[in-house]
Image (tube, coloured by chain):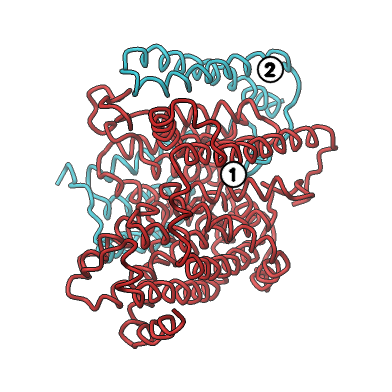
C-alpha cells in the first residue's frame, strides 16, 4: 500500500511540475515583449512553443489518468518509489546544503573533514575508527588538489 | 609533405618533448577524472609555465592534455553516473547502467579502445584535410550552422524514448534557460534582474552537474549499498570491452567520422557531439531494447566520436585561426606565446609544427588510452565499495568543481537548485538529456538564426546545405517517432539484472 502511495505521489507530482512550467513559460513570453526585437524574438518563440507543449502534456496526462507509464530509455535506473525513499532523498539534499554552508563558513579543507565525519557517523552509524581515517584522507585529497591544481577556495566567513 | 611528416616525428621524439607530452597526458587524465574540470581548466593550469619553453615541447604538453581528457572523463561517467566533462555526458546513458550490472570494466575497456581508435582517426583526418580545408570551411555559412543546431535538437526525439511531449517540453525549458543573461545579438540582459551573476548566463558545468550528478549521488545514498548492483568481481571484463570495440569496428569508424565533421565546425562543442552520436547509434540500431539499460554500443559511439573530434576542432583552429572550442581558444593563445600565428600561412611557414601537433595528438591518444586501460581495473573496483564511503569524496569534488566555475556563492545555490530539479524530473519520468541539449544549443540557435535572417532574409531556407541538413533532421525525427511506435507495440522486455 505504501508503495502504491509512492507511485501515486510520483504520478501526481508531474501535473504540478507541468503547471509550474506553464506559468514560467507564460512569464517568459510576457516579459520578453519588453525586449528589443533582436533580444526578444527567440525567447518569445521558445516560450510560445513551451506553452503549447505544456498544454498538450496536461491534456495527455488528463486523457491517460489512471494508466501506468512505460519505462523510458533515457532513465538511468528504476529506483524505489516509496515515500521513505523520497524523504531519504530529500534529506541527502539537506546534507549537500550543509556541506556548501560549511565550506563557505570554515573553508573547504576542514569543511570536507567535518562533513565526512558527520555524514558517516550520524547518517550511516559508521564507527569512529573507520570514519576518522576516511575523513582525514578526504581532507588530504582536497588539500592536495588545491595545491596541485592551484585551485582558488572561498575565503572562510568565520576565520 | 611526407618529408615534413617524418621530420616532425623526429622533432617530437626528443626526450624532453616526449616527457612534456607524457606530462600533458597525466594532467589530462587527472583533470578528466575530476567531474566539473575539463580540458580548458587543464590548459589554463599549465599556461603560465609555457613562457620561455621550447615551442614544440609546449605544444606537445597542451595537445597531451587536450587528447587525454576525453578518454579519462569516462571514469566518472561510467563508475558514478557523473559526466567527467561536457564531452562525456552521453556516455553516462549506457556506461553507468553497465557499471550497475557489474560490467564497469567492460564498459571502460570498450570506451578506452573506442577512444583510442577515434583519436587516431581524428589525427589521420587532420593530416588528410590539410590540403583541402579552406573550401570546406568556407562552405558553412550561418544558415548551415543554424540547421546543424536544429540537427542537434532533433536528437530530442530519440532521447525522449516513449515520452516525446515531455522530451520536447524539457528541450524548450533548456532553450528558455539558455536565454538568461546577455542576448547574443542585442545589447540587452534578459531575466537577470539586478543579479550580476546572471549577466553571463547560467554555466553549463553547473547545469550538467546539477541535472546528472547530484540526482545519482542522492539516489545511490538513499538506496544504500554499492554502485554495482550485482557481481562479485570484475574478472577480465575490460578485455571483453576491447573485443566489443573490435567487433563494432564499423560503428567506431562511422562515429569517428561524424565526430571529426562536427568538431570541424567552430563552436559546435564537445557537449553536442556525444549526444548527436548517441542519438544516431540508437536510431540506426536494429535492436534498441537495451539502450539506456547498458548497451555497449551506447558507450562506443559517443566515446569514439568524442576523441575523434579533437582532430576536427584543430582544423579551423590551425588553418584559419578560428578556435573550434573554448579549449582551442586557449591553445591559440599558447601558439601566440610561441610567436606562431595560426591561419592559412601556418602551412607555408610552420608545416613542421602542424605535423608535430598531429603526431602529438596520435601519440597522446595511444599513451592516454594505455594509461586508462591500466587504471580501469583497479578504479572499476570502486563500484563494489559501499557507496556511503565514496559519497563524501564525490560530493566534495563535485561541489568544489562547481565552485571553480565563477567562485561565486550562486554557483553552489544553482548547483543545488538544478540538482533538485534533476532529481524531481527523474522521479516524475521527465527526460533530462533534452533539457541539457536545449540549454547547450540555445545561444548558438539564437545567434545563427538572427544572423541568417539579417544576411539573407528568408532566402537562406533554400540554400542546398540547409536543405540537406533539414532532410537529415527530418529523417532523424521520423526515426524517433518509429522508435516510439515500436516501443509501444512490442511487449516491454526488461532485462534481468
Could you say which disc has been placed on residue A60 in the image? 2
B427 to B3, vertically: above or below? above
Chain A's shade in the image? Answer: cyan
Picture coordinates of residue B250, whole percent (x, y): 70, 63
Q: Seen in the image, is B247 located left or right of residue B38?
A: right
Q: Residues within 10 Å of mark 1 (few under 14, many from 20)?
A: some
Q: Which residue is mark 1?
A: B223
Picture coordinates of residue B253, whole percent (x, y): 64, 63
Q: Secondary structure at mark 1?
A: helix
Which residue: 40% across, 81% down? B4
Q: CA distance from mark 2 to mark 1?
A: 31 Å
Instruction: Name the one closer to the observer, B478 or A146.
Output: B478
Quarter placement of the N terminus of chain A: top right
Q: Seen in the image, is B445 located left or right of residue A114?
A: right
Asked whether residue B421 is in view, the answer is yes
Picture coordinates of residue B473, whole percent (x, y): 62, 38
Q: Chain of mark 1?
A: B
A52 to B228, vertically: above or below? above
B294 to B189, vertically: above or below? below
Q: Secondary structure at mark 2?
A: helix
Instruction: Name the one closer to the observer, B171 or B496.
Output: B171
Instruction: Name the one closer to the observer, B492 or B227.
Output: B492
Amino acid at each position: 500500500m505504501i508503495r502504491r502511495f509512492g507511485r501515486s505521489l510520483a504520478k501526481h507530482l508531474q501535473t504540478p511540475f507541468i503547471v509550474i512550467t506553464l506559468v514560467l513559460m507564460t512569464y517568459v513570453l510576457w516579459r520578453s515583449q519588453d525586449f528589443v526585437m533582436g533580444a526578444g524574438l527567440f525567447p518569445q518563440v521558445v516560450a510560445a512553443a513551451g506553452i503549447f507543449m505544456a498544454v498538450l502534456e496536461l491534456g495527455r496526462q488528463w486523457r491517460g489518468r489512471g494508466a501506468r507509464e512505460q519505462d523510458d530509455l533515457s532513465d538511468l535506473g528504476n529506483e524505489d518509489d516509496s515515500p521513505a525513499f523520497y524523504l531519504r532523498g530529500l534529506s541527502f539534499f539537506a546534507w549537500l546544503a550543509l556541506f556548501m554552508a560549511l565550506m563557505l563558513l570554515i573553508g573547504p579543507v576542514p569543511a570536507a573533514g567535518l562533513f565526512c565525519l558527520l555524514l558517516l557517523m550520524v547518517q550511516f552509524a559508521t564507527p569512529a575508527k573507520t570514519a576518522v581515517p576516511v575523513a582525514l584522507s578526504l581532507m588530504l585529497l582536497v588539500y592536495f588538489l588545491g595545491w596541485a591544481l592551484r585551485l582558488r577556495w572561498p575565503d572562510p566567513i568565520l576565520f | 609533405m611526407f618529408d615534413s611528416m617524418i621530420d616532425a616525428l623526429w622533432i617530437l621524439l626528443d626526450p624532453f618533448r616526449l616527457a612534456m607530452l607524457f606530462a600533458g597526458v597525466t594532467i589530462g587524465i587527472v583533470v578528466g577524472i575530476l567531474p566539473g574540470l575539463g580540458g580548458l581548466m587543464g590548459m589554463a593550469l599549465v599556461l603560465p609555465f609555457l613562457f620561455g619553453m621550447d615551442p614544440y615541447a609546449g605544444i606537445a604538453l597542451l595537445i597531451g592534455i587536450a587528447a587525454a581528457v576525453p578518454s579519462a572523463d569516462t571514469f566518472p561517467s561510467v563508475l558514478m553516473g557523473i559526466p567527467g566533462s561536457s564531452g562525456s555526458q552521453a556516455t553516462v546513458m549506457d556506461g553507468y547502467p553497465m557499471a550497475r550490472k557489474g560490467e564497469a570494466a567492460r564498459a571502460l575497456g570498450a570506451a578506452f579502445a573506442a577512444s583510442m581508435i577515434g583519436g587516431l582517426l581524428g589525427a589521420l583526418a587532420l593530416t588528410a584535410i590539410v590540403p583541402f580545408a579552406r573550401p570546406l570551411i568556407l562552405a558553412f555559412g550561418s544558415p548551415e550552422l543554424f540547421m546543424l543546431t536544429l540537427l542537434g535538437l532533433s536528437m530530442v526525439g530519440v532521447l525522449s524514448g516513449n515520452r516525446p511531449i515531455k522530451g520536447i517540453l524539457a528541450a524548450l525549458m533548456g532553450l528558455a534557460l539558455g536565454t538568461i543573461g546577455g542576448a547574443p545579438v542585442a545589447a540587452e540582459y534578459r531575466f537577470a534582474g539586478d543579479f550580476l551573476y546572471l549577466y553571463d548566463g547560467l554555466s553549463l558545468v553547473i547545469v550538467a552537474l546539477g541535472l546528472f550528478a547530484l540526482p545519482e549521488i542522492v539516489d545511490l545514498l538513499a538506496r544504500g549499498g554499492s554502485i554495482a548492483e550485482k557481481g562479485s568481481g570484475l574478472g577480465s571484463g575490460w578485455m571483453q570491452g576491447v573485443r566489443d570495440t573490435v567487433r563494432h569496428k564499423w560503428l567506431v569508424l562511422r562515429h569517428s567520422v561524424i565526430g571529426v565533421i562536427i568538431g570541424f565546425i567552430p563552436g559546435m562543442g564537445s557537449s553536442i557531439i556525444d549526444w548527436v552520436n548517441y542519438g544516431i547509434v540508437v536510431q540506426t540500431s536494429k535492436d534498441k531494447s537495451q539502450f539506456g539499460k547498458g548497451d555497449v554500443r551506447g558507450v562506443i559511439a559517443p566515446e569514439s566520436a568524442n576523441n575523434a573530434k579533437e582532430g576536427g576542432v584543430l582544423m579551423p583552429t590551425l588553418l584559419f585561426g578560428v578556435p573550434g572550442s573554448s579549449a582551442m581558444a586557449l591553445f591559440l593563445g599558447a601558439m601566440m606565446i610561441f610567436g606562431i600565428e595560426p591561419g592559412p600561412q601556418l602551412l607555408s611557414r610552420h608545416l613542421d609544427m602542424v605535423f608535430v601537433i598531429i603526431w602529438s595528438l596520435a601519440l597522446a591518444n595511444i599513451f592516454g588510452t594505455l594509461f586508462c586501460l591500466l587504471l580501469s581495473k583497479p578504479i572499476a573496483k570502486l563500484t563494489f565499495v559501499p557507496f556511503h564511503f565514496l559519497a563524501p569524496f564525490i560530493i566534495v569534488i563535485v561541489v568544489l568543481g562547481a565552485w571553480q566555475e565563477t567562485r561565486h556563492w550562486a554557483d553552489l545555490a544553482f548547483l543545488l537548485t538544478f540538482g533538485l530539479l534533476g532529481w524531481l524530473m527523474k522521479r516524475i519520468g521527465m527526460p533530462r538529456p533534452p533539457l541539457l541539449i536545449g540549454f547547450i544549443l540555445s545561444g548558438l540557435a539564437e545567434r545563427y538564426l538572427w544572423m541568417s535572417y539579417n544576411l539573407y532574409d528568408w532566402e537562406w531556407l533554400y540554400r542546398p546545405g540547409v536543405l540537406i541538413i533539414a532532410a537529415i533532421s527530418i529523417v532523424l525525427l521520423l526515426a524517433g517517432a518509429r522508435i516510439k511506435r515500436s516501443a509501444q507495440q512490442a511487449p516491454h522486455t526488461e532485462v534481468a539484472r
